[in-house]
Amino acid sequence: MRTLEQLVSAAQPWMLHGTGSYFRLMESVEPVHVRVFRQGRVVYNAENVEAGFFTSPDGGFDAVEVIVSNNPQRVKVAVSDGAGGYDRYTGSVNLATGTSVVNTGLVPVGVVATPVIYANVRRKGVRFLNSGDSVIYLGGAGVDLVNGCLKVNPGELLLENEAPGAAWYAVSDGVAGRLKVQELMG
């Protein structure tokens, strides 16, 4: 069993070479397309699949291609030659429940602390998606590259459930950043 991870962009699909008989998409931010090859021919094609998707094509495979449609995103997969696989493959259990989702939209993030969302005690959780090409650091007012302990790489999704009601700020690593934010309200 091999577990592999890669930042994938629409302009640069991820081609994994190597034999296998089992493929599982462990993590992806948005749906992806998966093409499975044997001797240069596509033997299986799956479109708009999400984390948890798996396939074991008869006769195995010697390459897999992962294609994203829109934003760059980090993708994690597992490949095996045998019958082994993952049952619980990623994530954590969060019992906090919200009753609505508020899409705050795309927030441009600069090289100085940028307010992302303001404090709200009704907020049960926050989702931060780095949909740009720069590294973004999250924290409180005055966050910078040195003291921003929450690092979000391009394509990564961060779910904040320890201090969701706090005011959050972000800073980019040198180029203009793009952060999508969803608030889970209770």
Image (cartoon, rainbow, N blue to C red):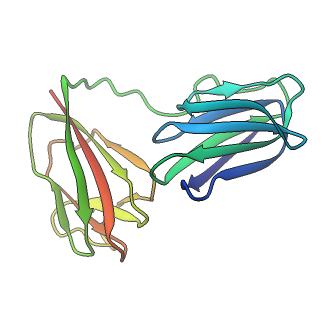
Q: Position of residue 76 (x, y in %)?
A: 60, 43
Count of marks placed on residues: 0
Left/right of residue 100 with respect to residue 147 in the rendered view: left
Q: Position of residue 130 (x, y in %)?
A: 37, 55
| 15 w.r.t. 103: above or below | below
Residue in the image at 10% along x and 33% along y? 122
Q: Position of residue 164 (x, y in %)?
A: 21, 42
Residue in the image at 37% along x and 73% along y? 173
| 142 w.r.t. 74: above or below | below
In the rendered image, the quadrant that contains the N terminus is top right
Q: Position of residue 31 (x, y in %)?
A: 50, 36
Left/right of residue 104 with respect to residue 78 in the rendered view: left
Left/right of residue 46 with respect to residue 49 in the rendered view: right
Residue in the image at 49% along x and 54% along y? 72
Q: Nearer the viewer, residue 163 or 158?
A: 158
| 183 w.r.t. 98: above or below | below
Q: Residue furthest front?
A: 41
Left/right of residue 102 with respect to residue 157 in the rendered view: left
In the rendered image, the quadrant that contains the C terminus is top left
Q: Quadrant of residue 33?
A: top right
Q: Quadrant of residue 93?
A: top left
